[in-house]
Amino acid sequence: DAAGLLDALGIAQAHVVGISMGGMIAQLMAAEYPQRVLSLTSIMSSTGNPAPRVAWGKPKALRAILSRPADPRDLQSVISRLEHVYSVIGSPDGGRDRAEFRAHLERIARRGMDTAASRRQLFAVLASGDRRPLLARITAPTLVLHGRLDPLMPLAAGVDTARCIKGARLVVIEGMGHDLPPALLPRLADEIAAHAGLPGA
């Protein structure tokens, strides 16, 4: 689908960045469509390696993402559930303004939350299996960004990703969990821009 989107937009090649499951998709794209990928950045993702220390985060984080709102029809209940999830999997000190973040979560909740979609995402991750043989085929310059404090996708997953892609560079982001905290966005943007060789990096 990602390669098809490039076709539809008339883009021959792109710098590809993926986060979490998006990182897994980006890895597949780099392996299967090498001529389309100028560079790959895999963020807080994994290889599908089934080893427990690599594949599984902390039980509390897994329980949080699988939780449901007390009342799925009640807006405040949905927002509170989202707040709880990010309080568990997010960066401990991400520089978020609580009121501003709650307003952001409210926009998400009002747009519509589909619990079935969340389950399908989890099943898609599980169904993708062990991608290590595919990752060995990646030739694009690769940057792996991973938070040291990620409770959902352990740091070992990032280390494993970098190890499986020839020439990949691993950058461990101190203080980062499984989210994109405002305080760390400039650092992340700088790392990606420098890797892609973009102006101003």
Image: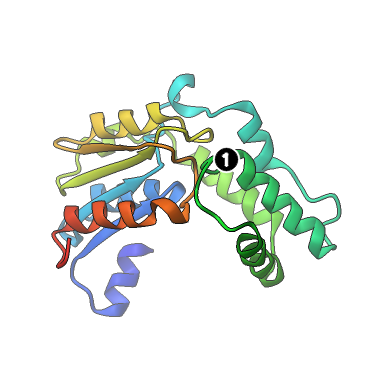
Image quadrant occupied by the N terminus: bottom left
Residue where numbered disc 1 is placed: 89
- The answer to whether 4 is drawn above or below residue 60 in the figure is below
Residue found at x 66% / y 71%? 111
Q: How far across and how far down the image is residue 58, in percent?
A: 58, 27
Position of 119 with respect to 77 (left or right) is: left
- Exactly how many numbered labels are in the figure? 1
Q: How far across and how far down the image is residue 179, in percent?
A: 49, 48
| Element marked by disc 1 | helix
Image quadrant occupied by the C terminus: bottom left
CA neighbours of label 1 inside 10 A, class few (<14), some (14 to 19), many (20+): many
- The answer to whether 13 is drawn above or below residue 8 in the figure is above
Position of 91 with respect to 132 (left or right) is: right
Residue found at x 75% / y 53%? 80
Q: Nearer the viewer, residue 201 or 42?
A: 201
Q: How far across and how far down the image is residue 136, in percent?
A: 21, 35
Question: What type is the residue that disc 1 sits on?
Answer: Ile
Q: Nearer the viewer, residue 183 or 43?
A: 183
Residue found at x 19% / y 38%? 168
Q: How far across and how far down the image is residue 114, in percent?
A: 69, 60
Residue found at x 38% / y 36%? 174
Position of 200 with respect to 51 (left or right) is: left
- Colour scheme of the picture: rainbow
